[in-house]
Amino acid sequence: MPNLRSRKMPLANSTTTYGPLARAFHWLIALGILLMIPLGWIAHLAPMQDADQIALKTALFSAHKTLGVALFLLALLRILWALVQPKPVPLHPHRKGETLLAEAIHWVLYAALVIVPLSGWVEHAATDGFAPILWPFGQNLPFVPSSPQVAETAATVHFLSQWALVGALALHIAGVLKHTVLDRDATLARMARGTAAGTEGGHSGFAAPLALAVLIWAGVIGGGAAAGYFTQEGAPDAPALEAAASDWQVQEGTLSIALVQMGSEVTGSFADWTAAITFEPQDAPGKSGEVTVQIAIPSLTLGSVTKQAMGADFFDAETYPTATFQADLMNVADGYVAEGTLSLKGVDLPVSLPFTLTLDGDRAEMTGRTTLDRMGFAIGANMADPGQLSHEVEVIVALTATRSAE
């Protein structure tokens, strides 16, 4: 009986073929791309007119993001492995132009496998709420602030680079078909089965393909910039609020809201609002003053759902561009409370806003918060399930005001 020896297949590449690890990386990433691209477009085009549609769109985007992050990490491993491995020689080194283009497309693909998912990840990290990644880590990224501007820029890079990925992938596939159908060589077999082919020592330099890849990327990003893709969209048109005549002038302040969407907290703030305040401090319980607050609804930023929030099913900002809160400022046993009425989206409801007040001569610092039921104002009535969008919306106010000179 012959003496049979076990033969170990090396993981590394050789100058004539790709090793098992490189091939595994290649086909896993190829499968991921074939899933991720259509999944992203289906999620993008999915409607979100009712709760079920919004839940489906959220699930699709969550799956797309999760797959994208996984592909990003896999691509990093693929690139690191490629950097320490010999690259199989071209099968037709005398075809200088074809070889240059093929290797440049490989560099474009490598860059796309990093830029596309990373830009999408940055957009996610810079945006509050909507479609979380389906594992605990990665919801935020170091050095990436929660910023609509950062999110918009990252989204633009993601959009442009995905077309670079699609274009490079199409050229890559076309090249493989040419080698398989017309040239009838072992290009595909080297990656599919590890077939050895080519003459050792036939390597070409990488400087020219890399330079060409850089030019291609410069064309993609530069062309997008020239076409205006990086132009930040301004805030929705908001009514110009007239300066309020007030005994106390607000020097600085914030008016923000917080709610929970799909289990994640979403925060937003109104950029344009005014407050007309009359107030005289007193020790005895009772009325100490009055306040009228006007709010420009289209000045709200609310993470990734700002545009949706302005729609007819939610704030309906086009029909109801302003909200008004009129209240008496009451001195109560444990502090102060603004007792009044909030007029929002054509509905008037009583609202009580407890607040703390610190007085220092003619300077006052105030912080307060209350919780509203959005359903009472018919905001998001099509999303009645609190598991998808909480009914409770927390309103947080903080301001510094000084007494007007007489």
Image (tube, helix red, strand yellow):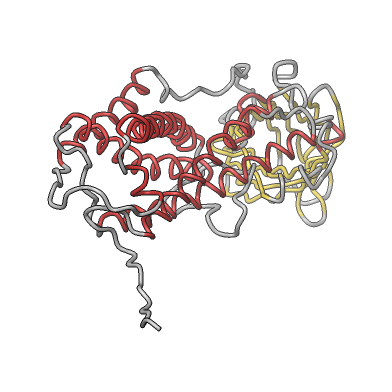
Q: Quadrant of the C terminus?
A: top right
* Residue 362 appears in the picture as rendered: no
Residue nearest the viewer, comparing 56 with 78:
78
Q: Is residue 344 above or below residue 256?
A: above
Q: Residue at x 60, y 57 (%)?
A: 135
* Residue 264 appears in the picture as rendered: yes
Q: Residue at x 32, y 36 (%)?
A: 184
Q: Quadrant of residue 39?
A: top right
Q: Where residue 178 sits in the image (x, y, percent)?
A: 34, 30
Q: Is residue 137 above or below residue 237?
A: below
Q: Quadrant of the N terminus?
A: bottom left
Q: Where residue 114 sits in the image (x, y, percent)?
A: 39, 45
Q: Residue at x 76, y 51 (%)?
A: 283
Q: Where residue 318 sits in the image (x, y, percent)?
A: 70, 16
Residue nearest the viewer, comparing 207 with 404:
207
Residue nearest the viewer, comparing 1 with 23:
1
Q: Quadrant of residue 100?
A: top left
Point out the residue furthest to the front here: 1
The reply, left or right, for residue 221 in relation to residue 127 is left
Question: How many marks are shown on the rendered structure?
Answer: 0
Q: Residue at x 80, y 26 (%)?
A: 343
